[in-house]
Amino acid sequence: MDQQLLPEILKAELRIRPYTLTTPLLRSLLLSTHGANVYLKLENEQYTGSFKARGSMNKVLSLTGEQRKHGVVTASTGNHGLGVARAAKETAVKCVVFVSDNADTSKIEAIKQYGAEIQYTKAGLSETLSHAQAKEYAKEHNMAWVSPYNDLQVIAGQGTISVELVKQLANIDYVFVTVGGGGLISGMTTYLNAISPNTQVIGCLPEKSAEMYLSVKAGKFVPVQSETTLSDGSAGGFEEGSITFPLCQKLVKDWTLVSEEEIKDSLKLILKTHHKLIEGSAAVAVASYLKRKDEFVGKNVVILLCGSNIAPATLKSIL
């Protein structure tokens, strides 16, 4: 699968370049005081405030002309929903986004601003059930389903971050990447393994939602009831049979889990020292580095800040 993925990443880089930003790589003076050279990859400054703009754009652009006529469907109140809605608007494709009827209204309004149609599911449905409803709707209306992570083109789009990284920094020893469904780390690691094989990617997860880590350790899909976490962008794990699971099994050799307090402290640290707004899932990667900072003295370390879409009420409670 990773051999099939690499050429898709190269295609994605050419395909989405006119529609996405090359995000900055910023050296962190504060985080570098521990002895490593630490850089922040600012995907929180990408269109829609998240790396998700890449994979969803690549997926929509890879559809046939006939598929685009019928439109796309996804299920997400978060960064993926925003990414798909924007990709559809940029390409004049109809878009339907399934959201829970108790979802944050500000997130729903943000999706609506891109012209997407909203379909509501009952509050409390699991991700599996909400996705099932959306997939059924897509089938009934002959529309293309866009998975947040279980899709080759979506993963390839996320992998374009690594294409930028190797151009921005010559020697990269470690990259810290937050893991939810596994699409981001699968895409990034596939490219780095091929182009910069000495670079080690570390998967970062909140202790309260660590399904991919637990499954990789067990060697099989382990369903976990995720608890509430500040890292809501990575919460929920992945669906059984996802193509990201064998990719993570093969490619990711190092993992770090962090507590809610560590996530909170890291979010405040980035806001205070760099004046960068990040969401909880981005703070997971920062917290993971800080938890193990003594291991990386003299190394070049990149921390991926994957998004900035934190709910105002959540930010207020943290501060």
Image (cartoon, rainbow, N blue to C red):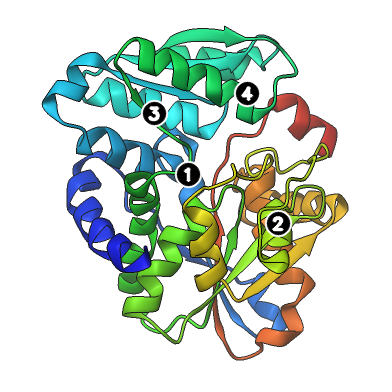
Badge 1 amino acid: Tyr
Q: Residue at x 71, y 44 (%)?
A: 231
Residue 121, position as x, y percentages in the image: 61, 11
Q: Quadrant of the C terminus?
A: top right
Q: Residues within 10 Å of mark 1 (few under 14, many from 20)?
A: many
Residue 119, position as x, y percentages in the image: 51, 8
Question: Which residue has dot 2 on it?
Answer: 205
The correct choice, above or below, for 38 with respect to 82 in the image is: below
Instruction: Classify mark 3: helix, strand or loop.
Output: helix
Instruction: Classify mark 2: helix, strand or loop.
Output: strand
Instruction: Classify mark 1: helix, strand or loop.
Output: loop
- Can I make out residue 158 in this image? yes
Question: Which residue has dot 3 on it?
Answer: 84
Numbered circle sitting on residue 78:
none
Distance of label 2 from label 3 (alpha carbons): 24 Å
Q: Residues within 10 Å of mark 2 (few under 14, many from 20)?
A: many
Question: Which residue has dot 1 on it?
Answer: 149
Badge 4 amino acid: Leu
Discs 4/1, front: 4
Q: Residue at x 14, y 22 (%)?
A: 66
Q: Quadrant of the N terminus?
A: bottom left
Distance of label 4 from label 3 (alpha carbons): 20 Å
Q: Nearer the N terminus, badge 4 or badge 3?
A: 3
Q: Nearer the N terminus, badge 4 or badge 2?
A: 4
Residue 253's image quarter? bottom right
The correct choice, above or below, for 285 with respect to 78 in the image is: below
Distance of label 4 from label 2 (alpha carbons): 23 Å
